[in-house]
Image: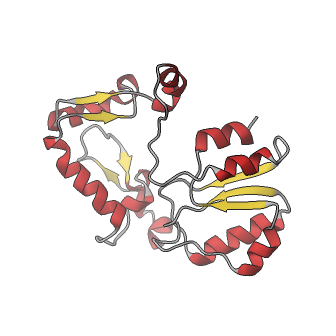
Amino acid sequence: MSYVTSGYLETSLDWIPGMNNIRLRDFPSFIRITDINDFLLNYLMNEVEALPRASAVVLNTFDALEHDSVKPLNALNPRIFTLGPLHLMEQHLQDEGVKQLGSNLWKEDVSCIHWLDTKDDGSVVFVNFGSIAVMTKEQLIEFGWGLANSKKDFLWITRPDIVGGNEAVMPPEFLDEIKGRGMITSWCPQEQVNLLCFL
């Protein structure tokens, strides 16, 4: 935590091709971790090491947006293709017969869609920390009680490893407090939820 206040995260890195003026703070927090045994860090390291051997690599971006960052990757593997952003192509792909387009790391719980259908338009708070944020058990519980005390209906996505790689568990009294107005699930079909929550 001292790095957050000491200015250390402002350190510039000039040795990453295609990433001019990038600072340590610009990296996702899971890359700044100090545990070399971290699952996600090791997964990413393995993927980067495999990059030169891949028969093809498809990136969910488009060249005009990230040309300077994609170009150095082409030096590692010339068979890199930019195709995207995929979420903007979803309707077109469905029209062409593609049944589903997704890149989720976790299984989607579609029961939240049925639950949202029982709620009035614009009445549900949607909370999702994404696929890489982590927090302590105490932070999770504090945040949960903030949602409960809001007295609003809410859909809260707490993926399985949000508490530093451990399962996210809320106390029984919290679950009693939110009964009927709060739904907690591990992952959701986010595009559908966004349409329902933000119409």
* Residue 156 locus on image (x, y percent): 67, 58
Q: Nearer the viewer, residue 118 or 149?
A: 118
* Residue 91 locus on image (x, y percent): 55, 24
What is the number of callouts on the image?
0
The quadrant where residue 199 appears? top right
Q: Would residue 132 appear left or right of 172 to someone viewing this image?
A: left
Vertical placement of residue 15 versus 167, above or below: above
Q: Residue furthest left?
A: 53
Q: Residue at x 30, y 33 (%)?
A: 58
Q: Residue at x 16, y 34 (%)?
A: 75
Q: Would residue 57 appear left or right of 40 to someone viewing this image?
A: left
* Residue 155 locus on image (x, y percent): 71, 55
| Protein image colouring | secondary structure
Q: Would residue 198 appear left or right of 107 to someone viewing this image?
A: right
* Residue 15 locus on image (x, y percent): 23, 47
Vertical placement of residue 183 versus 114, above or below: below
Q: Residue at x 75, y 48 (%)?
A: 116
Q: Nearer the viewer, residue 69 or 120?
A: 120
Q: Nearer the viewer, residue 13 or 175?
A: 175
Vertical placement of residue 4 versus 23, above or below: below
Q: Residue at x 20, y 32 (%)?
A: 74
